[in-house]
């Protein structure tokens, strides 16, 4: 599938990445293709050397489309065929969000690692159950937080912060508009019981970035709000959300997420991140440089050494995926710790619950 910069649902980057395994050394399967992000997940793993062995989905049309992009994938007649294959090390999936945890349970109980699209859960109860299963099985429940993991500027920002480019991070501000593309969305997209709410969904990306950049293990929730401002025909849709956190190290965070990208924008969203450190600042223009270049992935850095504009597009090779593969083989946690993965989901769902409670009391 080609990268479609105008449609976030089918945005699937690929890269000339370092291959960390030989062909056939790390076999994967793709399953439950409800969201187009599964193409990005698959691209990232294949680019890093994974061998795609199987695909499964109950919808033959989705399978046919997937195999057209990845002809090496064998079509599984049922999901158990994948779970019972000892060669498969990891299953990547992008099911309807309320089904992701149940599918993950099957994968982990089969002794395989799981790589799901965000949001990984739609309820705190699902998260707690999965914590128990991860502890019991020792398998990984990894999440495709693509707005950092599959974005060059966002990844490079993390590397620069680790290298001390702006000192200690004291605040992160994330602006994450998305294009609604209302006519092309499936019915579940507008059913809050299926997708979990806008903060649970898009918000999980933003919280994960904050925890990474600020070096926090967890955070305290200050404020959260969700609204449906202009889609009364779709009462289950939340088209606007915002939240504020204070990290366990004192760092501050605010994010706005919405479905208000205008049709005239060249990409599916003008996502931006602003990071304040004790010794410098960063601005990330993650998907385009407005009115100048699209696609783009730019990082603006100011510190004691001066000002820099860094063109990041196509420069990182998206190392997360190779790190994840090595983690699965070596049972390490270099790509992302399980605690971090779950904390981002937990905080976004706690914010969603606070916003829902406030609306219920109106």
Image (cartoon, rainbow, N blue to C red):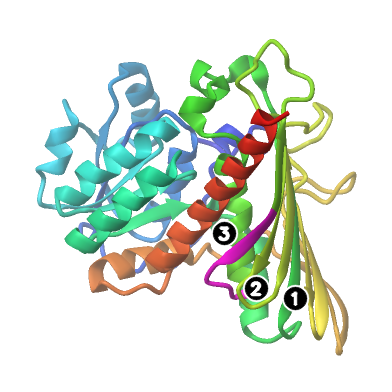
Residue interval drawn in magenta: 215-222
Q: Give how far across and how far down residue 310 sits, in percent.
A: 77, 69
Q: From the image, tell me which residue sits under label 3.
A: 208
Residue at the (49%, 33%) spot, across then down? 36
Dot 1 crowding, Cα within 10 Å, few <14, some 14–19, many 20+: some
Q: From the image, tell me which residue sits under label 1.
A: 170
> Sequence order check: which comes first, mark 2 or mark 3?
3
Callout 1 secondary element: strand
Q: Is residue 333 magenta?
A: no
Residue at the (12%, 35%) spot, across then down? 81
Q: Give how far across and how far down residue 260 sits, in percent.
A: 78, 31
Residue at the (46%, 27%) spot, across then down? 194
Tell which of 260 and 64 is nearer to you. Answer: 260
Q: Is residue 89 visible?
A: yes
For the residues labelled 1 and 2, the Cα–Cα distance comes to 7 Å
For residue 309, which numbered disc appears in the image? none
Q: Give how far across and how far down residue 202 sits, in percent.
A: 61, 43
Residue at the (66%, 40%) spot, across then down? 355
For residue 214, which numbered disc appears in the image? 2
For the residues labelled 3 and 1, the Cα–Cα distance comes to 16 Å
Q: Is residue 13 visible?
A: no
Asked whether the beta carbons under mark 1 and mark 2 sit within 8 Å of each other, the answer is yes
Dot 2 crowding, Cα within 10 Å, few <14, some 14–19, many 20+: many
């Amino acid at each position: 599938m080609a990268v479609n910069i105008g449609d976030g649902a089918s945005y699937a980057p690929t890269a000339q990445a370092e291959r960390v395994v030989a062909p056939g050394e790390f076999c994967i399967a793709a399953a439950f293709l409800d969201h187009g992000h599964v193409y990005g997940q698959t691209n990232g793993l294949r680019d890093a050397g994974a061998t795609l062995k199987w695909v499964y989905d109950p919808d033959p049309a989705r399978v046919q489309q997937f195999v057209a992009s990845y002809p090496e994938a064998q079509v599984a007649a049922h999901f158990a065929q994948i779970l019972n294959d000892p060669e498969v090390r990891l299953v990547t999936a992008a099911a309807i969000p309320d089904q992701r945890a149940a599918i993950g349970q099957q994968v982990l109980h089969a002794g395989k690692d799981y790589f799901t699209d965000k949001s990984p859960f739609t309820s705190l109860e699902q998260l707690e159950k999965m914590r128990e299963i991860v502890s019991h099985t020792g398998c990984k429940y990894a999440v495709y937080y693509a707005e950092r993991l599959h974005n060059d500027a966002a990844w490079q920002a993390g590397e620069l912060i680790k290298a001390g480019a702006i000192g200690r991070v004291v605040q992160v501000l994330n602006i994450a508009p998305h294009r609604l593309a209302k006519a092309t969305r499936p019915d579940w997209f507008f059913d809050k019981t299926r997708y979990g709410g806008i903060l649970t969904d898009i918000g999980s990306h933003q919280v994960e970035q904050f925890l990474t950049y600020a070096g926090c293990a967890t955070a305290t929730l200050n404020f959260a709000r969700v609204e449906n401002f202009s889609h009364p025909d779709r009462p289950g849709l939340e088209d606007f959300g915002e939240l504020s956190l204070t990290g366990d190290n004192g760092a501050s965070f605010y994010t706005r997420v919405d479905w208000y990208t205008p049709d005239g924008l060249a990409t599916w969203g003008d996502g931006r991140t602003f990071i304040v450190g004790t010794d410098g600042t960063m601005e990330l223009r993650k998907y385009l440089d407005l009115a100048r270049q699209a696609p783009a992935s730019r990082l603006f850095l100011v510190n004691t050494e001066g000002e820099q504009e860094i063109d990041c597009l196509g420069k990182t090779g998206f190392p997360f995926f190779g790190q994840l593969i090595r983690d699965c083989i070596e049972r390490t946690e270099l790509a992302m710790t399980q605690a971090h993965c779950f904390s981002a989901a937990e905080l976004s769902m706690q914010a969603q619950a606070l916003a829902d409670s406030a609306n219920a009391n109106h």
